[in-house]
Image: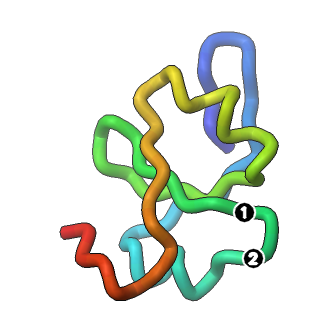
Amino acid sequence: MIKIDDMQIPAERYEDIKEAREALKKDEIIVKDNEGIIWIVDNENYPKIEGFGYDRIDPSPSTDES
């Protein structure tokens, strides 16, 4: 769960990008917060957190995110 002010956004936290890519499901995206923590959130919830320092991560393993 991502908590921002009064909002609680359903999300799953992951230790690394590879683990998140393996768990990714349809209609979900991978994001990284400003502390470098990796999360999976629903597509519809991303606009709610984007302005708080959450960046979308490319789900394809061909891109190195380290």
Name the residue at 40% across, 86% down: 61
Q: Quadrant of the N terminus?
A: top right
Pointer 2 local density, CA inside 10 Å: few below 14, some 14–19, many at least 20? few
Write down the quadrant of residue 66 in the picture. Answer: bottom left
Furthest residue toward left: 66
> How many discs appear?
2
- Which labelled disc corresponds to residue 12? none
Asked if labels 2 and 1 touch by Cβ distance under 8 angstroms, the answer is yes
Q: Could you tell whether 46 is left or right of 35 in the image?
A: right
x and y, in percent, of residue 60 in the image: 46, 81
Write down the quadrant of residue 12 in the picture. Answer: bottom right
Query: Which residue is disc 2 drawn over?
Result: 25
x and y, in percent, of residue 38 in the image: 44, 58
Name the residue at 75% across, 76% down: 25
Query: Which residue is disc 1 drawn over?
Result: 28
Q: Could you tell whether 25 is left or right of 14 in the image?
A: right
The span from disc 1 to disc 2 (Cα, nearest Å) is: 6 Å
Name the residue at 54% across, 31% down: 50
Colour pattern: rainbow
Q: Amino acid at mark 1?
A: Glu
Q: Could you tell whether 8 is left or right of 62 in the image?
A: right
Q: Amino acid at mark 2?
A: Lys
x and y, in percent, of residue 8 in the image: 74, 29
2 to 17, vertically: above or below:
above
Q: Which element is circle 1 on?
A: strand
Write down the quadrant of residue 16 in the picture. Answer: bottom left
